[in-house]
Amino acid sequence: MHRSFRDIEADFRKAAPTVAFCSFRIEREFHEWVSVVRGTPQPVSTQTTLGGMITLYTKTGYGYAATSDLSTEGISAVIEEALLWAQLSEGKLVTELGPLPVPSASEQNTELDFQTKVSAPWSTLSVTQKLDELKNANERLKCDDLISDWGAELWYSEKEVVHSFAGGANHHQHFVSVTPSLWATAHKPGLSQSRSFGRDGVQQGGLEILDRTGWREAPDRIASQALQLLAAPPCPTGDMDAVIAGDQMVLQIHESIGHPLELDRILGDERNYAGTSFVSLDMVGTYQYGSPYLNITFDPEAEGAAASFKYDEEGTESAREFLIKDGRLIRLLGGTSSQQRAGVPGVANARASAWNRPPIDRMANINMEPGSSSLDELISDVDEGVYLETNRSWSIDDSRNKFQFGCEWAEQIKNGKRVGPVRNANYKGISADFWRSLSGVGNISTMNLGGSPYCGKGEPNQAIRVGHRTPACQFRNISVFGGAG
């Protein structure tokens, strides 16, 4: 039975109990994947989900429950279940939780509170036309007999969320994204090398993303670089300077800044599953996280970024905030509930991955502010070092401190010039030392808009989209090493 969000919301408001706080978050999500692998079209795959979650507070208890039964009876039943859990938890919570603020009904807007800006809707191209685009990319990727594996994919996602508050307003948001990707592996006896494009390039928008990211021009370069890597010498090993491209900085910031600053992790909530953090509450306002070149913002307002929104899933309105300014830590990634617990400033980042998951502290768009240097200027300032691009592998300890990353593409730098590719490049470090070695930040021309569609956290697991807008960066005297093969 298909029911409108308006009818579902009306049933919730009629059945909502009189408690300190009660809300109902309804989500409809749709995905479609179109791909061609090794020149062969794959079955078009789609996925649709629809459901809702009740969250409520009594005086000293907290409860939530989710359902895919959005009938009048189903909504009444899920409210009763959440209320039962709240009553059972009264006086037994590990930490005291205050009720969330209820948005005033006067704030109600008949228009969407947030809607992704789309210039070319997914429906602009038929499935046949999308397959033709992917076939063309495949033909260009398979440019040599040494290319042993190749493919291209378009992934469309659409999500609509209505969050209703008993005694208050509702928030209505609509998100759209297209993620185009490519990959090619070159092989000769004893050695394989791969290059990819776009797998961590998730953005909001429509098919205009294909041109925005340069996806249509990328197949020739990706295949050529995979072949070049087969003939390249191993990456040198030693302490040296490095210029790291914006697409690799996406994961560097994600793992060694984004996750360590999540407030629920700092409070210990993630210890059993995703680990803790080397950051502690007393560092806020005083800790020198990196060099003065390091400026990190939480920016859910950035157009086209993967995790832009108007309200988080606790109903808090979003705003751009500095997390790190001139290298100093000034704010953590904690939503309203976590801020109440910890007594430190946070942001609107309580987010849930689906209708059947409660919100937890998550990254949204965690961006590095650009500097003033071009890529050529960053490289020209390096006597001996490497240029690193596109993540291949990663490892980081449970406290998000010691890390190791591998990159698909690397070039050796000598006397301020790139002198040729090297293969199997890796680098490692400790977060504090690494960020304090930051010696230059690229300008807007070096920026990369990307993120992760599968950032995992929480029990049960929540895989969610996060965004990062990152420039190329220069680091002094970091540990670089070549891998096997």
Image (cartoon, rainbow, N blue to C red):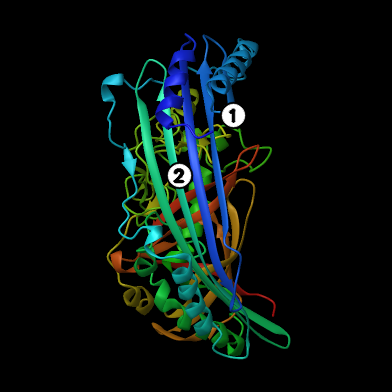
Amino acid type of the residue that numbered disc 1 sits on in the rendered structure: Thr
**Residue farthest to the right, as pictured:** 190
Query: Residue 466 location in percent, x, y?
Result: 47, 50
Mark 1 or 2, nearer chain start = 1
- From this view, report whether residue 250 is shown above or below residue 417: above
Nearer-the-camera pick, 434 or 107: 107
Q: How many marks?
A: 2
Instruction: Give me the disc on residue 441.
Output: none
Q: Look at the image and tell me whether residue 207 can be seen.
A: yes
Query: Residue 448 location in percent, x, y?
Result: 39, 64
Disc 2 element: strand
Quarter-wise, where is residue 165 in the image?
top left
Q: Residues within 10 Å of mark 2 (few under 14, many from 20)?
A: some
Is there CB contact under 8 Å for labels 1 and 2? no
Which residue position is annotated with label 1?
A: 67
Quarter holding the N terminus is top right
Disc 1 element: strand
Query: Residue 299 location in percent, x, y?
Result: 35, 46
Q: Look at the image and tell me whether residue 329 can be seen.
A: no
Q: Residue at x 59, y 15 (%)?
A: 80
Label 1 to label 2: alpha-carbon separation: 17 Å
Nearer-the-camera pick, 34 or 200: 34
Amino acid type of the residue that numbered disc 2 sits on in the rendered structure: Lys
- From this view, report whether residue 105 is shown above or below residue 6: above
Instruction: Give me the disc on residue 159.
Output: 2
**Residue farthest to the front, as pictured:** 1
Q: How crowded is mark 1: few (under 14 residues within 10 Å), some or many (20 or more)?
A: some
328 left or right, relative to 220: left
- From this view, report whether residue 231 is shown above or below residue 358: below
277 left or right, relative to 343: right
